[in-house]
Image (cartoon, grey):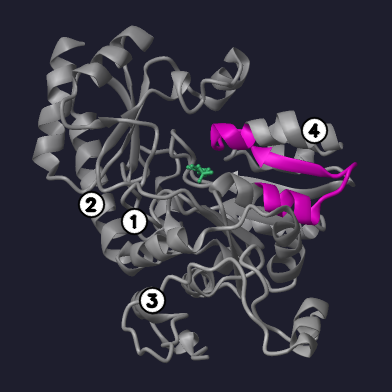
Amino acid sequence: MKSTYDEWAQATRAVRTGHEHTAENENSEPIFATSSYVFESARQAAARFSGDEPGNIYSRFTNPTVRIFEERLAALEDGESCIATASGMSAILAICMGLLQAGDHIISSRSIFGTSVVLFTKYLSKLGIDTSFVSLTDISAWEAAIRPETRLLFLETPSNPLTEIADIQVLADLAHANGCLLVVDNCFCTPVLQKPLGMGADLVVHSATKYLDGQGRCVGGAVVGDSKIVGEEVFGFLRSAGPTMSPFNAWVFLKGLETLKIRMEAHSRNAMALAAWLYEQPSILRVHYPGLEDHPQYSLARRQQKAAGGVVSFEVKGGREQAWKLIDSTRLLSITANLGDTKTTITHPATTTHGRLSEQEKALAGISEGLIRVAVGLEDIHDLTNDLALGLERT
Ligand SMILES: *Cc1c(COP(=O)(O)O)cnc(C)c1O
């Protein structure tokens, strides 16, 4: 096993880490489409099952293609261990099921992916796990929410869709001072733009569906952290409950990781240009993008991230009616709630990704009816601004 990845720069790890040639000497990573593995003897089978001998047993537990993806993502995040999951949501579920029990308490940013809110409030609550929601950027609110039974602090930064930025280091210190773990959903930045473990976070969670794939093909997720928590406790839930990543999907994500760096830089460049253009449009009330100097956490974003990322949101005058009109008048942009694709996507958070939140939850999270989110892809910036200009003329 070539485990010398720490000598390599991130760009090299993205292309090379984890792949050991098989006897065929293939240059591209193979897809191991197999559900189980044969043993040399009954004795070896027994040793594998008892855990005395490491090695493959069954693809719900481990698969060589999935393992290449796990090792490579761990190397990119500077983490000890990674487990791949069937989706981003099952990565978050695996953390909670692996680490928490009835009576435990989570503090979460209010500005997280809508389904994560549903998972915490509708399902984990049934198991006696309570969640308090606080403002991502208000440290005193996090502090005030801590209880003796608090185990996890959970956040996304930048947040979706308003791109607020959390100070990871400060929240990691707060978590550790109170015997809690900090979990960062690093979906929007990826390890190319931000490495939360290096700033004190204990666990990084990914929806690989987004930028890690990068071309909108497969659904997947991952958890990265130290080998005890991730490799034993979170993995323990995964191998028993089964939301594992398929080898085919792992292979697609591996190919995505190989181009992640150049894509994240290009997404950020295009998003910066689009945000600056939107900022100049008179019919737009506000633009939310961490690369704009009037973003409330502009200097924190510059310190914490290598670039501002690919997601821009903005508010139009006239609420839902005008927002829908603008979305419907675009010709090039894809009307879809996905993000992290080479194709630029446009969505109305209040009625899609955040549609299941109550009116009060939406108001607290700042999801107004005039808000539009654009996940900027890799098309030419002039074609993107021309497309949005069509709709702006009509609003
Ligand atoms: C999409 C997304 C998720 C959920 O991931 P799936 O792969 O769709 O299950 C979690 N967090 C963030 C920030 C996301 O954008």
* Callout 3 touching callout 1 (CB < 8 Å): no
**Circle nearer the viewer, 3 or 2:** 3
Mark 2 vs 1: CB contact within 8 A: yes
| Residue that carries the numbered disc 4 in the rendered image | 125
Type of amino acid at the residue the image marks with label 4: Ser
Kindly tell me whether residue 289 is visible in this rendering: yes
| SS for dot 2 | helix
Residue under numbered circle 2: 269
- Label 1's element? loop
Residue at the (53%, 68%) spot, across then down: 34
Residue type marked 3: Glu
Magenta residues (range): 93-117
Q: Earlier in the sequence, mark 4 or mark 3?
A: 3
Q: Give the labeled residue for mark 3.
A: 29
- Residue 95 versus residue 279: which sits nearer the camera? 95
For the residues labelled 3 and 1, the Cα–Cα distance comes to 30 Å
* Numbered disc in front, either 4 or 1: 4
The answer to whether 131 appears left or right of 292 in the picture is right
Residue 381 is inside the magenta segment: no
